[in-house]
Amino acid sequence: MTGRLAQLWRYPVKSMLGERLPAADVGPAGIAGDRRLALRHRDTGRVASAKHPRLWRGLLTLRAAGAAPAPVRITLPDGRTLSTVDPDVDDVLSRVLDIPVTLIDRPPAGATLDRADPDAVLAAGLTAEVPVHVSSLGAAAPGTFFDFAPVHLVTTATLARVSAELPGAAVDAVRYRPNLVLDVDAEGFAENGWVGRELRIGPDLVLRVLAPTPRCAVPTLAHGPLPPQAQALSVPARLNRVAPLPQLGPQPCVGAYAQVLRGGRVAPGAVVEIG
């Protein structure tokens, strides 16, 4: 099976909006500069994540661009920008989010985040008190803030399959926060069957698919100018509820997680081969 790399994305600060790239280097820790920074709640010590939307959905009103350790630029909802090296960056972000936060560049020992039960969020709404599970992070690649793996991919076929169920509005890839959007000749949710297989992208990059990606409440949230879209989660919950890992029960899944077997530089248009 072959295709093309359609889009390439980086998210410099965990749970903030990211940037679409014209090219990128990909290594063992994923795309250079991806998820290298995060915010930490000063009171609880938890890493900020929009997976807990009642508390952190405001992160998706902020857009980050650049690759740490160089300064990363953050655009605020009112269009103002600040740099991650500005002396008042923590105070400004705390005021915007109305939560006391500190920008960090490494996961603290025992780093955790809160993940609200996605089915409960669908049923009760974004502002409701729902069950929250505590998840650890930082094991996928030292010094990063990935939840499970350094690369997340989704196919245009899967996006089209979800969109076909929506009343007059396609689902945008950014709702699922992929690094790679692949345009291949496949059925929707084909990523489920790629576990254990290798993907070659361009002349150098080789990935191994690890698991389907279980979806949290994030796709349902407003993403910058994109309004909330509950169907971005409810459709896969109905059409593609699978167990991504043996220890997990069935989850609504979109896309797949992957690890990097051999790094390389890639750009949209690169040939994709699925072994």
Image: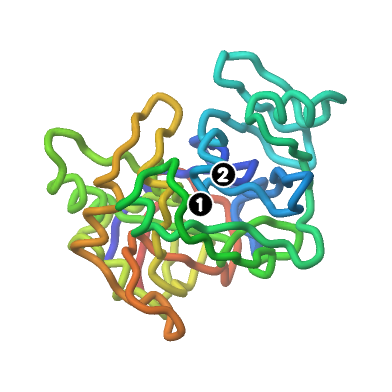
Observer able to see residue 75: yes
User: Residue 189, located in which quarter of the rendered image?
Assistant: bottom left
| Three-letter code for the amino acid on which mark 2 is drawn | Ser
Q: Is residue 227 left or right of residue 67?
A: left
Height in image: 160 above or below 228?
A: below
Q: Nearer the viewer, residue 98 or 205?
A: 98
The reply to whether discs 1 and 2 touch (Cβ–Cβ < 8 Å) is yes
Height in image: 221 above or below 78?
A: below
Q: Residue at 29%, 44% (x, y): give it.
A: 230
Number of marks: 2
User: Residue 137, located in which quarter of the rendered image?
Assistant: bottom right
Provide residue 77's location: percent of width, then percent of height.
55, 20
Q: Nearer the viewer, residue 16 or 96?
A: 96
User: Farthest residue toward the front?
Assistant: 129
Provide residue 209's location: percent of width, then percent of height.
44, 72
Q: Could you tell which of marks 1 and 2 lies nearer the N-terminus?
A: 2
Q: Quadrant of the N terminus?
A: bottom left
Element under disc 1: loop
Height in image: 137 above or below 126?
A: below
Element under disc 2: loop
- Label 1 Cα crowd, 10 Å radius (few <14 / some 14-19 / many 20+): many
Marks 1, 2: nearer the viewer: 1
User: Residue 117, located in which quarter of the rendered image?
Assistant: bottom left
Q: Nearer the viewer, residue 36 or 54?
A: 54
Q: Is residue 122 left or right of residue 150?
A: left
Provide residue 258's location: percent of width, then percent of height.
49, 67
Q: Nearer the viewer, residue 127 or 136?
A: 127
Q: Residue at 41%, 64% (x, y): give it.
A: 213
- Residue at numbered disc 2: 15
- Residue at numbered disc 1: 51
Work out how far the residue at label 1 is from the one at label 2, CA to CA, in angstroms: 8 Å
